[in-house]
Amino acid sequence: MDARATLAPAERKALRARAHALHPILQLGGKGLTDAVVAEIDRALTHHELIKVRAAPLNRDEREVALASICERTGAHAIQHIGKMLVIYREKPRQEPPPAATPTRTSRPGSRTSSPRPASARPPRRRPPSRSTPWRSAKKSKSSRP
């Protein structure tokens, strides 16, 4: 089964557009597609979801076979094969949110404080500065100018 058939054309088009700005994460070497390279592609797909792979030393037919092999071994979708670049996509698994902690009361019912610490532990309040500062009284007002 071709991995391209499972994605809608509009999805593939959107993924190609997203991949346009990406740089290749992996580069196939002279040994071609080894188990270590497939494992690294798998890790990259887990982390990034959409990756580019450069397959420079392979000829066109070998790149097609390598792309099909990568998709089969990693469970990914082939998005694009253009030139020596392979674009591969595998959706990240949805992570379940951690269970919510049980709510704790911060104060006794009916109390006015919402803080869990007692009032004596609060820092003292700062007094606002007084309005009559010495530099204001010495300053001349605009109305007293000639």
Image: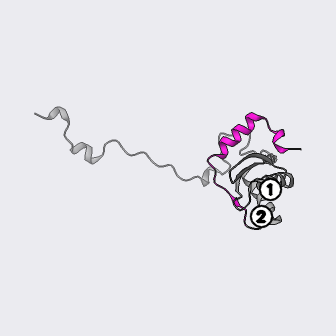
Please state which of residues 27 and 75 is positioned toward the viewer in this rendering: 27
Residue 135, position as x, y percentages in the image:
26, 47
Q: Does residue 110 show up? A: no
For residue 48, side relative to residue 130 (left or right):
right
Task: Tell me, yes or no, whether the highlighted magenta stretch contains residue 68.
Answer: no
Residue 10, position as x, y percentages in the image:
73, 34
Is label 2 in a helix, a strand or a loop?
loop
Q: Amino acid at mark 2?
A: Gly
Q: Earlier in the sequence, mark 2 or mark 1?
A: 2
Is label 1 in a helix, a strand or a loop?
helix
Residue 48, position as x, y percentages in the image:
72, 52
Q: Residues within 10 Å of mark 2 (few under 14, many from 20)?
A: some
Task: Tell me, yes or no, whether the highlighted magenta stretch contains residue 15.
Answer: yes
Image-quadrant location for residue 18: top right
Which range is magenta? 1-29
Q: Residue furthest right?
A: 1
Quadrant housing the N terminus = top right
Residue 2, position as x, y percentages in the image:
85, 44
Number of marks in the image? 2
Q: Residues within 10 Å of mark 1 (few under 14, many from 20)?
A: some
Please state which of residues 90 and 92 is positioned toward the viewer in this rendering: 90
Q: Amino acid at mark 1?
A: Ala
Q: Residue at x 61, y 47 (%)?
A: 21
Q: CA distance from mark 2 to mark 1?
A: 8 Å
Q: Residue at x 31, y 43 (%)?
A: 132
Q: Which residue is mark 1?
A: 66
> In the image, which disc is placed on residue 32?
2
Q: Residue furthest top?
A: 143
- Is the C-beta separation of discs 2 and 1 under 8 Å? yes
